[in-house]
Amino acid sequence: MANKDTRAAKRYALALFNTAVQTQKLDSIEQNLTDLLALMNQTPTLRQYWESPLIPSGRKREQIATILGDTVDPATLAFLRLLVDKRREDLLDAIDYELRQQVDASRHLVRAEATFALEPTESEKTALVRSLEQRTGESVLLSVQVDSSILGGVVVRLHDTIIDGSVRGTLERVREQLLQEA
């Protein structure tokens, strides 16, 4: 995505976030966007319709109201109509991402992704979460993946930081060190 589009998505997300906080509808608006994007991912024709520049704005606004109707908060519907009016439908995924960043920051929440070589026990997950919370000073929401190619240990992605505690990563670092010494 172009830098200009990223800035636009951030502005739209911040405006939506501020509106959601002021109206005390943050949870419902956040859930509405999550559900809508899931529906679009499951229904490619809906996404094509949403992103099509060939469909007149007025018709698209009416169809969105018909399709979503009472299933979304009126503030969410108004926001979607604004995107249609401004012809910025293509930013919806980026806006959702940026909104989630704002929501997480307001809740002092950090999302972390941990890749283990084997399925971790609950106590291993709990210990990792506790360690990450001490490191960040924030609450941590951990998603877990299993990838046997890391051989052992764990690799954690926390924002833009990767903490490689895997056996494979350790072996690669030792290899690099030996090659530099040779």
Image (tube, rainbow, N blue to C red):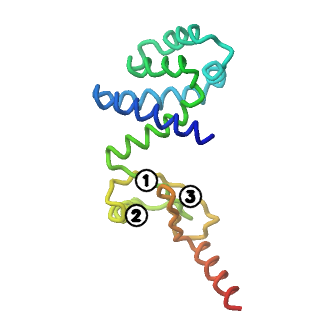
- Pointer 2 with pointer 1, Cβ within 8 A: yes
Residue 58 in which image quadrant: top right
Q: Which amino acid does label 3 sit on?
A: Val
Instruction: Tell me the mark number nearer the camera, choosing from 3 and 2.
Output: 2
Cα distance in 3D space between marks 1 and 3: 13 Å
Disc 2 designates what residue?
128
**Quadrant where the N terminus is found in the figure:** top right
Find residue 155 and report its horizontal and vertical position in percent. Answer: 53, 64
Find residue 72 and report its horizontal and vertical position in percent. Answer: 42, 19
Name the side, left or right, on which 168 lies relative to 102.
right
Find residue 143 and report its horizontal and vertical position in percent. Answer: 47, 52
Disc 1 designates what residue?
142
Q: What residue type is labelled 1?
A: Leu
The residue drawn where x is 43% and y is 51% is 111
Instruction: Tell me the mark number nearer the camera, choosing from 1 and 3.
Output: 1
Query: How packed is label 1: few (under 14 Cα within 10 Å), some, or many (20 or more)?
Result: some
The residue drawn where x is 44% and y is 37% is 99
Q: Pick whichever, 79 or 138, lies toward us.
A: 79
Specify which label sits upstream in the sequence, 3 or 2: 2
Residue 57 in which image quadrant: top right
- The image shows residue 36, relative to residue 3, as above or below, that is above
- The image shows residue 107, relative to residue 127, as above or below, that is above
Disc assigned to residue 100: none
Disc 3 designates what residue?
146
- The image shows residue 50, relative to residue 169, as above or below, that is above
Q: Is mark 1 on a helix, strand or loop?
A: strand
